[in-house]
Image (cartoon, rainbow, N blue to C red):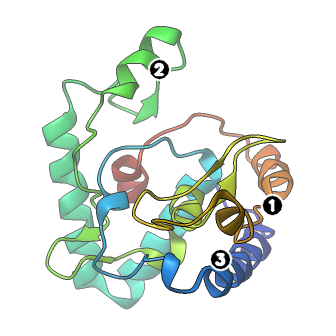
Amino acid sequence: MRLPSGDSLLVQIMSASFAEAAQLAGERLVCRQGCTQCCHGTFVLNPLDSLRLRSGMDILRATEPALAAEVEHRAQMWVVEHENGFPGDFQTGILGDTSFDRERFEGFANEAPCPALDPETGRCDVYAWRPMTCRIFGPPVRMGDGGALGHCELCFVGASTDEVAACEMTVPFDLEAELLDEIPAKGETVVAFALLG
């Protein structure tokens, strides 16, 4: 399965939007390499995020095979460690979609470091291909139409509601939804399984 061609536009828009939000926020946005709080815990990956990570791993295998092998090793160790509690089909890595599975996911691997995280440097080894969740974490982002404005708890300390709102990051959820419609596979997974492809 191929990554939709429009994903490069989505990534460009997200990079520009983050840069604008970061410029507006200044020192109130404390996200930097080495700050890894958001790199712990497991979150859902949609098929677009999965394909982007798989594409990135293909590039990494071709250009930096030793680094790719290291990332794959961390992903394999993550899978082995969390096999028993996985709320879905462990053979495919696809998360279950029942209410029971979703409830189980709420407490699943919440403290586990992301297998893409280099524990020594605090760097994401697949940063260029990271999921949307990682691209929007930090600045104020409004989830859904008229939803609450949320941001990383380490950022905007002491800022007023208006100061936070003035730094809102715009997210092209509609474009992401269009790209997801182009992908036949609809199952959701987690980073470790996507990295292993």
Instruction: Determine which residue is flagged by label 2.
Output: 102
Q: CA distance from mark 3 to mark 2?
A: 30 Å
The secondary element bearing badge 1 is classed as: loop
Which residue is found at the position 20% from the left and 72% from the top? 70
Q: CA distance from mark 1 to mark 3?
A: 12 Å
Q: Could you say where residue 107 lies in the image, as x and y percent from the top left?
A: 31, 27
Q: Is residue 88 visible?
A: no
- Foreground: disc 1 or disc 3: 3
Q: Earlier in the sequence, mark 2 or mark 1?
A: 2
Say whether residue 82 is left or right of residue 176: left
Instruction: Determine which residue is flagged by label 3.
Output: 18
Q: Could you say where residue 61 lies in the image, as x and y percent from the top left?
A: 36, 78
Instruction: Determine which residue is flagged by label 1.
Output: 172
Which residue is found at the position 21% from the left and 52% from the top? 76
Q: Could you say where residue 57 lies in the image, as x and y percent from the top left?
A: 43, 71
Q: Tag 2: residue type? A: Arg
Q: Tag 1: residue type? A: Pro
| Label 3 crowd bin: few (<14), some (14–19), many (20+), radius 10 Å | many
Q: Could you say where residue 48 lies in the image, as x and y percent from the top left?
A: 64, 53
Q: Are marks 1 and 3 in contact (CB under 8 Å)?
A: no
Residue 146: quarter of image:
top right
- Foreground: disc 3 or disc 2: 3
Q: Earlier in the sequence, mark 1 or mark 3?
A: 3
Compared to residue 92, the image places residue 191 above or below, namely below
| Label 1 crowd bin: few (<14), some (14–19), many (20+), radius 10 Å | few
Q: Earlier in the sequence, mark 3 or mark 2?
A: 3
Closer to the camera in the image, 185 or 126: 126
The secondary element bearing badge 2 is classed as: helix
Residue 5: quarter of image:
bottom right
